[in-house]
Every structure is written in structure tokens, then in C-alpha cells.
Image (cartoon, coloured by chain):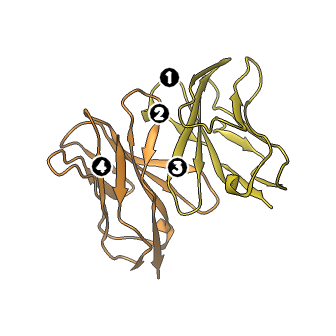
Amino acid sequence: NAGVMQNPRHLVRRRGQEARLRCSPMKGHSHVYWYRQLPEEGLKFMVYLQKENIIDESGMPKERFSAEFPKEGPSILRIQQVVRGDSAAYFCASSPIRESETQYFGPGTRLLVL
Amino acid sequence: GNSVTQMEGPVTLSEEAFLTINCTYTATGYPSLFWYVQYPGEGLQLLLKATKADDKGSNKGFEATYRKETTSFHLEKGSVQVSDSAVYFCALDDGAGTALIFGKGTTLSVSS
């Protein structure tokens, strides 16, 4: 049973470009969570999605960031017009039900903005 | 709001030494508490958890007891190995089943 898959594992962008991060949840999991880990910091919750719905985006910056989890395909975290401060590790987690206790994490995407 | 505070690292130990990583929390209600481990270049793995006061979570020789009176969930291991070198995160859930709230992480380095 494959775990949570994220790609790319490393992404380099120049300021002003767009970054697209993909997350494929574990088989049978319909709940996806995105977290951001800034250097020397713990993970911070960004957004929680179910298939085709954003349930909680209270941790998402209001501008430039968006997330989706379509009926088919992976969840996408999109960052437009990236800035240096967006450099971080972005982790996706999935769970079979809405319960933080059963979140399984992917290996993360490390975004570097030059 | 809910928060987690854990001791700053890095923690450097020799193999077979005793490990304690302190974690305290602030929360309304009765959150579940977790320890996650992150090996270099990898995602977080759940190490152990406790869901109510006085519960003890344990796994791979690691233990932590949910102490409501001191709002603590300290991680301990009696004899660490080089393979335990990683970053350890204490976390609690937000009660709504949505988000985990993490501490800043403690880096453990074990030498032989």
C-alpha cells in the first residue's frame, strides 16, 4: 500500500514565477491537509480539503496561495508570484476520515525561491 | 489559542544514554497529544500518541505520558541508538479534527 506521494520533492523557482505542488493521498483516503515548515520552525497548518471541497483554509495566506483537490487526480497547492519568503518545506497529509489522529504525512516538497 | 512548546535543541548524546525531550502544551478542552519523528529528507512519521490524561504512549522504546496536571507530554527513551538521530516534534490536535499544532522540533544527534 503506497504511502502519501508528493512531487516534485525539490522545486526551484525564481521570484515572480508560479509553483505547483502535488499530493496524492493514500489509497482510500479522501481527506487532505497541507502544512508548511519554515526553516527552524515546526509545521504550520495551511488548508484542509476533501474531494472537490475546501473545508478549512484558515492557515492559508490570503493572497497568492490556492489549493484544490479535484474529483480525479492529486491535490494541488499553487503559489503564484513566489517570493523568497515562500521558501520552505510543504508537507501533505491524508486521512481516511476527518480526524487529525490518523493523518499520514508525505515526504514533502522543498521549495527554494531564488 | 492552542500551542505547543518543546525544548530547543540540538540534543547531543552518546549511544545508550538516556533521552528526555520536554514538551508542554496550552489547550482548551482535552486534546490528543502526539510525538512525530522526521528523519533527514523524509516526511513526518507518527512515533506515539496519547488521547487522554494519564495515558502512556509507547513505541520503539520511546515513551511519553499525558500529564494534565502539568500540561506536559515529555518524550523519554532509556537507551538511544545512532539510528534515533532525527528531529522530534511534539503536537496536539485542534479538537476539530482538522489541524495538528506542532512545536518547533528538537534535533537529536546520537554518536557511537
Q: CA distance from mark 2 to mark 4?
A: 20 Å
Residue highlighted by disc 4? B25
Q: Which mark is residue A43?
A: 3
Which chain is tinted yellow?
A: A
Secondary structure of the residue carrying numbered label 4: strand
The residue mark sitting in front, 1 or 4, is: 4
CA neighbours of label 3 inside 10 A, class few (<14), some (14 to 19), many (20+)? many
Q: CA distance from mark 2 to mark 3?
A: 16 Å
- Looking at the picture, does residue B67 appear above or below residue A103? below
Label 2: chain letter: A
Q: Are marks 1 and 2 in contact (CB under 8 Å)?
A: yes
Labels 3 and 4 touching (C-beta < 8 A) = no
Does the image show residue B85?
A: yes
For the residue marked with disc 3, what is the amino acid?
Leu
User: Which residue was labeled with disc 2?
Assistant: A102
Q: Which residue is mark 1?
A: A97
Foreground of the two, A26 or B98: B98
Q: Chain of mark 4?
A: B
Q: Whole-Å distance between the Cαs marked 1 and 3? A: 21 Å
Residue in the picture at 45% in, 33% down: A100
Q: Are marks 2 and 3 in contact (CB under 8 Å)?
A: no
Are the residues under badges 2 and 3 in a single subunit? Answer: yes
Q: Amino acid at mark 2?
A: Thr
Q: Which chain is orange?
A: B
| Total numbered labels | 4
Q: Kindly give the residue lying farthest to the front in the view shown.
A: A63
